[in-house]
Image (spheres, rainbow, N blue to C red):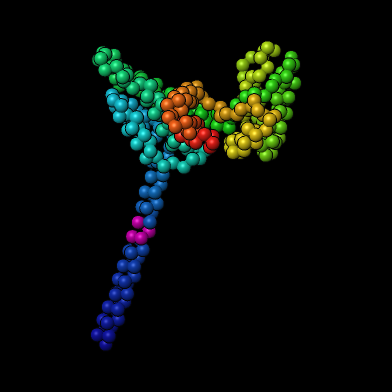
Amino acid sequence: MQNSHGTTCRIVMEQHAVTDIEIERRCKQITESYEERITSLEKTVENKCDKEKVKEIVREEIKNCNDDMVKMMVKEEVGKIEAPITEESCNEEKVKAIITEEISKIQKPDNKGDSDSTNNEVDKAANPITRKETVTNVLEEINERKSRENNLIVFGIPEIDDESKEVRDNTDKEKLNELFTDCKIKLDKENLKTVKRLRKFNKEKLNRPILVKLPSAEPKITLFRNIHYIKTNPKYEKVGVSNDLTQAEREQEKRFWDQARRQTEEEVSGDYHFKVRGPPWARKVVKLKKLDS
């Protein structure tokens, strides 16, 4: 009788032990699962391309900017960022371009004979105030580019000679709406948030560029995709469209086009020429066959 009772107790204990082991195993699985989720969240936060991340990248790289390797180091560091492009996180390609641009402004000059000048530039770059100014410049440039990303500049649309600004603005909106319609874009005049002629009104020069602020980037993207409708329409033979660039972007654009013209002049065969292509944050000079332009 006792043996039977002891056997029963042992079986019950073994069952409880198995249950305990199973519970422990499940707890371990749950713990590991949460650890993976936490790690994933930490990586997401760590990789998020936010204001503090940009500050950290620039700070770390600028304090070492005593040689030409700094550009490469910054690109590699920023290249580690894999943040998605959303309203809350900026495009890492834009950040790379802006940081590289700002860093280049404080690189030591190619004046090997003037050591004092070189040392002064290095000291200036290492100065905390200079580093802080550069970080500020980067962030300001990012914010300015963000504020302009839905904008367009339209060139070549004649301006009417009327003293009333309201009449001139309404006429410009009608002409712009016609241009969008011809490019297969449905956009009411009310959706043209801002239509503004740049520079002061001058009866002698009725051809000022127009700044156009759109409700989103989508109609602008469609316009560039359908730009052939403008280029092939005699009505728009003098009309051009471009992005609303910052001062830094305009300077960079000029350098790219100067490079393209120089390379075209140096091209021996005569079958190719060089053009500037790509979005504002990733512009580059490309080699094209003349028939492909």
Q: Main secondary structure of the magenta part?
A: helix
Q: Is residue 91 left or right of residue 232?
A: left
Query: Which x, y percent locates residue 213?
Result: 62, 29
Q: Is residue 233 left or right of residue 287?
A: right
Q: Which residues are magenta?
A: 28-32
* Residue shown at the point (59%, 35%) measured from the top left: 224
Considering only vertical position in the picture, is 31 above or below 153? below
* Residue shown at the point (30%, 81%) measured from the top left: 8
Query: Which x, y percent locates residue 119?
Result: 26, 17
* Residue shown at the point (41%, 47%) measured from the top left: 41
Which residue reaches farthest front? 269
Q: Quadrant of residue 110?
A: top left
Question: Does the segment drawn in magenta span residue 74?
Answer: no
Question: Does the segment drawn in magenta span residue 30?
Answer: yes
Considering only vertical position in the picture, is 7 above or below 29? below
Q: For this rendering, which residue is in front, 271 or 213?
A: 271
